[in-house]
């Protein structure tokens, strides 16, 4: 575009759309008015064509940055999203997103300088994934911020703001919350599945994070899901895209389809019969951009009277608004983000940030007898398991590629004293290995593992899952369910290997790598220490070693419930929230949402409310004092839960309404305050209406949720108080 502007040395002759001083809408209107119908349609395909006569270069809208810039060469790889959610630190996530968008900008401008405008080189990113992780079998749950709408919303807003920047005129990059809406498996059915959901569940569970990312986060874009919701294809849903997204929430950005989702409308959902009908239905309903090529049929759809050119104009204008806001039609010197140097990519500063987030993502699930932290000068340590020295379990999915990385084995080797012998044995494959004519392979590594264990003072077992086992349909070569899981146990011979090592009598620490919960019931009963490491990014091994050897005090909390078995779950295809997640689950879990241990201890006191009785429509401020009573500096995640004690409809058992991660030195105290707003007190009734009813409410504050299982595992108390809402029932804006 800059080269094209040189044809207009005199600003008086400069076309309106090229004048950076003209209002945005005027520029957009001027440009679109110059396009033919065919040219307009060409801009509605993710791989948009160049229009040389107007100086419009080709542009590929598809890019990814779930936890670092993906698929575009070397980049900083942060922990997978579910791990970052375990930090319960939205401020840190914001810093991570700022670093990601810095790298994204730097990469883009360097690629363009070298005339590369291909896929994964643009500034429009299809992240974050803010779907609710309602069922642990879903392979893409790792991409989300967990099962709770409030936590997901806070983390989603932080990520969107960090990506898009805070300039009054220009976007740093475009963030695209996905997959809108009611989407969380099963993966093999997503192209034809109809997610049936009540109005109550829709607005209580599945929509809040999207609303917050749009209204508070100001996300410029949103991606529709593959599935139908209550009969309507999500990428062509008048209810989702018009009534809720644009009319209720005031969304002014653009909607992009998931890849191939427009084809699904006629091929699999059978809602339409032809590509023309599918494309017209999608655009008329509010979808503006096609990941795929079905929108090419829009030219014929106009000729067939299925859609007006005015509807095409509306969509194209939304797309060009985004490109103008990215500064793509302005001189680079006017766009501050264009000056981010390429050297920020894969920088030491960002590497340190990746380590910081990896440390905060670690969740200590068990530490019987204070086995952890380990001493660094032990005579010998055994590191055993298929995930001990494996790159893939650092990276997760939708990942970039780091220039350097630290596996668990390497991190441990770096951490221990020079006099400590570190034995390593894989022990077994991630999944069952096939027997051969040369003999059985499944247990072929057991002997080496046991030899290492027997010669060591402590054994660190690195087990769990891998992105080869869980993830998106088509990207998981070892999954038998299209990326989903059919069971929750350790796969292959891992459990048998663990039992064999435990039988040696040596102290065992289990480090779990996964993007989703594992039902490690036997391990919980028989292994003294368990650390959930997720897919921890390029510095994952360093973070694991820091925690294991006491250079960092673990403070992460589970963003998703670890159930004991599949029997505790409703059918995978059932989208009702009854019996799901900590909010509606009645059975006792293995490890609850919000749970995590520390090496130090925290004492809560002086819980106070600024009022024990308020009028409907007024807020309540809650404060509590937190003191580190242990001997080690550490982080505490202060959690506030609310329970409506007199609700007229079913409401959650209790629900997260506030959290704050604080760091305290030994003996240090801090006061933490939360505001409970009328909207947080309100319920969603069976008609999907947001209602604040008078009645009593219970507030609980502590380092965990107020459930019996968490109390038994953590051995800590939570504080509680009640307040009353008086007056008449009122309806609130959703």
Image: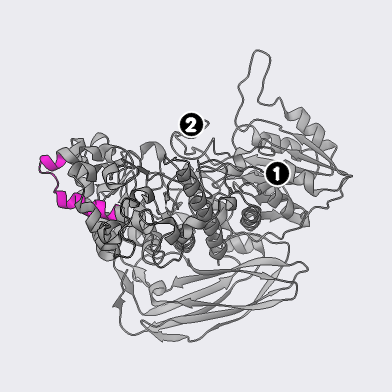
Count neighbours of disc 1 (C-alpha within 10 A) and say few if under 14, some if 14 to 19, many if 20 or more: many
Residue 121 sits in quarter: top left
Give the Cα separation between the discs numbered 2 and 1. 27 Å
Q: Along the line of sight, which residue is nearer the eye, 412 or 301?
A: 301
Q: Along the line of sight, which residue is nearer the eye, 243 or 690?
A: 243
Q: Is residue 614 above or below residue 373?
A: below
Magenta span: chief secondary structure: helix
Where residue 165 appears, x then y in whole percent? Answer: 46, 62
Q: What stretch is highlighted in magenta?
A: 301-319
Whether residue 266 is visible to the viewer of this picture, yes or no, is: yes
Where residue 413 appears, x then y in whole percent? Answer: 78, 43
- The residue beneath circle 1 is 408
Count neighbours of disc 2 (C-alpha within 10 A) and say few if under 14, some if 14 to 19, many if 20 or more: few
Q: Is mark 1 on a helix, strand or loop?
A: helix
Q: What element carries label 2?
A: loop
**Sooner in the amino-acid sequence: mark 2 or mark 1:** 1
As for residue 715 lying within the magenta part, the answer is no
Q: Along the line of sight, which residue is nearer the eye, 416 or 733?
A: 416
- The residue beneath circle 2 is 480
């Amino acid at each position: 575009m800059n080269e094209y502007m040189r044809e207009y040395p005199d600003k008086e002759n400069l076309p309106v759309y090229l004048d950076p001083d003209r209002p945005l809408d005027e520029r957009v209107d001027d440009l679109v008015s110059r396009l033919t119908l065919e040219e307009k349609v060409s801009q509605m395909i993710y791989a948009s064509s160049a229009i040389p006569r107007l100086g419009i270069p080709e542009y590929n809208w598809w890019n990814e940055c779930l936890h670092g810039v993906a698929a575009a060469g070397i980049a900083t790889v942060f922990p997978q999203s579910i791990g970052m959610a375990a930090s319960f630190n939205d401020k840190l996530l914001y810093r991570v997103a700022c670093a990601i968008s810095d790298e994204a900008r730097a990469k883009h401008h360097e690629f363009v300088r070298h005339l590369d405008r291909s896929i994964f080189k643009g500034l429009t990113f299809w992240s974050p994934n803010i779907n609710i992780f309602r069922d642990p079998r879903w392979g893409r749950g790792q991409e989300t911020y967990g099962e709770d709408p409030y936590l997901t919303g806070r983390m989603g807003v932080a990520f969107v703001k960090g990506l898009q920047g805070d300039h009054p005129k220009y976007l740093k990059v475009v963030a695209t919350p996905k997959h809108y809406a009611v989407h969380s498996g099963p993966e093999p059915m997503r192209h034809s599945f109809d997610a049936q959901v009540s109005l109550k569940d829709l607005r209580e569970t599945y929509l809040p994070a999207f609303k917050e990312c749009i209204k508070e986060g100001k996300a410029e874009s949103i991606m529709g899901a593959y599935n139908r919701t209550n009969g309507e294809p999500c990428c062509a849903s008048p209810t989702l895209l018009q009534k809720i997204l644009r009319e209720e929430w005031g969304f002014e950005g653009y909607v992009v389809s998931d890849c191939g989702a427009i084809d699904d409308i006629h091929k699999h959902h059978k809602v339409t019969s032809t590509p023309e009908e599918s494309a017209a239905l999608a655009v008329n309903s509010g979808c503006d951009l096609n990941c795929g090529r079905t929108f090419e049929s829009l030219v014929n759809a106009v000729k067939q009277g299925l859609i007006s050119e005015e509807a095409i104009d509306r969509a194209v204008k939304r797309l060009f608004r985004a490109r103008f806001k990215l500064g793509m039609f302005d001189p680079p010197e006017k766009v501050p983000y264009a000056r981010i140097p390429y050297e920020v990519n894969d920088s030491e500063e960002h590497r340190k940030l990746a380590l910081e987030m990896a440390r905060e993502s670690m969740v200590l699930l068990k530490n019987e007898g204070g086995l952890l932290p380990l001493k660094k000068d032990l005579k010998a340590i055994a590191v055993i398991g298929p995930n001990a020295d494996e790159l893939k379990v650092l990276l997760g999915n939708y990942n970039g590629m780091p220039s350097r990385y630290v596996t668990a084995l390497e991190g441990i080797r770096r951490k221990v004293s020079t006099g400590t012998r570190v034995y390593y044995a894989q022990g077994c494959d991630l999944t069952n290995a096939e027997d051969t004519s040369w003999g059985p392979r499944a247990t072929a590594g057991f002997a080496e593992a046991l030899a290492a264990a027997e010669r060591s003072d402590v054994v660190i077992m690195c087990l769990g899952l891998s992105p080869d086992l869980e993830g998106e349909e088509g990207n998981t070569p070892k999954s038998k369910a299209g990326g989903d899981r059919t069971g929750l146990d350790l796969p292959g011979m891992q459990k048998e290997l663990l039992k064999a090592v435990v039988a040696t009598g040596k102290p065992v620490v289990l480090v779990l790598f996964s993007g989703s919960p594992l039902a490690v019931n036997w391990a919980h009963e028989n292994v003294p220490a368990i650390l959930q490491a997720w897919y921890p990014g390029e510095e994952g091994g360093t973070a694991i070693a820091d925690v294991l050897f006491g250079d960092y005090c673990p403070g992460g909390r589970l963003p998703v419930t670890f159930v004991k078995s599949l029997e505790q779950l409703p059918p995978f295809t059932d989208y009702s929230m009854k019996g799901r997640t900590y909010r509606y689950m009645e059975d006792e879990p293995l490890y609850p949402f919000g749970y995590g241990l520390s090496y130090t201890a925290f004492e809560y006191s002086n819980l106070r409310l600024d009022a024990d009785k308020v009028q409907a429509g007024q807020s309540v401020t809650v404060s509590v004092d937190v003191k580190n009573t242990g001997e080690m500096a550490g982080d505490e995640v202060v959690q506030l839960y609310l329970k409506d004690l007199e609700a007229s409809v079913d409401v959650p058992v209790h629900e997260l309404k506030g959290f704050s991660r604080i760091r305290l030195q030994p003996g240090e105290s801090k006061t933490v305050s939360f505001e409970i707003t009328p909207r947080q007190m309100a319920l969603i009734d069976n008609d999907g209406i947001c209602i604040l009813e008078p009645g009593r409410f219970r507030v609980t504050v502590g380092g965990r949720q107020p459930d019996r299982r968490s109390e038994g595992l953590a051995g800590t108390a939570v504080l509680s108080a009640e307040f009353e809402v008086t007056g008449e029932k009122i309806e609130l804006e959703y």
